[in-house]
Image (tube, grey):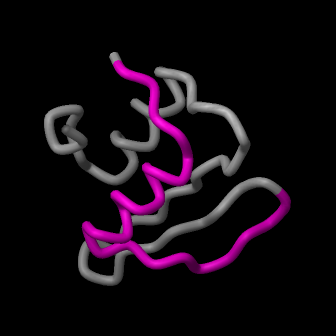
Amino acid sequence: MKQYSSRYIISFLKKKGFIIVKQKGSHISMFNEITWKMVIVPFHNRDLKTWTLLSILKQSWFSKEDLF
């Protein structure tokens, strides 16, 4: 699976209806008012690891195909 940066994932989630609720340290909490899903995205200067990305997608109910 391709590596993605946290900035890309945050912009992807914003396009899908998530909004930034708060930031604590290096983690950003995002919430979708339609689906009532809360997702926490680590905000670092490096790409997200595959298992972290899959966990974020699972929490937001998106698949890998939605990301492409």
Question: Looking at the picture, how far across and down is residue 10, in whole percent?
Answer: 47, 59
Question: Looking at the picture, how far across and down is residue 54, in whole percent?
Answer: 40, 30
The structure residue drawn at horizontal position 68% and vertical position 77%, both measured from the top left corner, is: 22
25 left or right, relative to 40: right
Q: Residue furthest left?
A: 65
User: Camera-side residue: 58 or 4?
Assistant: 4
Vertical placement of 40 versus 54: above or below?
below
Residue 24 falls inside the magenta stretch: yes
The structure residue drawn at horizontal position 47% and vertical position 64%, both measured from the top left corner, is: 38
Q: Which residue lies furthest to the top in this view?
A: 1
Vertical placement of 61 versus 14: above or below?
above
Quarter of the figure that contains the N terminus: top left
Vertical placement of 11 versus 35: above or below?
above
Residue 16 falls inside the magenta stretch: yes
User: Camera-side residue: 51 or 11?
Assistant: 11
Q: Which residue lies furthest to the right in this view?
A: 25
Tally of numbered tags? 0
> Based on the displayed image, in which of its 4 quarters is residue 24 positioned?
bottom right
The structure residue drawn at horizontal position 46% and vertical position 34%, both measured from the top left corner, is: 4
Quarter of the figure that contains the C terminus: top left
52 left or right, relative to 16: right
47 left or right, relative to 46: left
Question: Looking at the picture, how far across and down is residue 7, in whole percent?
Answer: 53, 53
The boundaries of the magenta stretch are 2-25
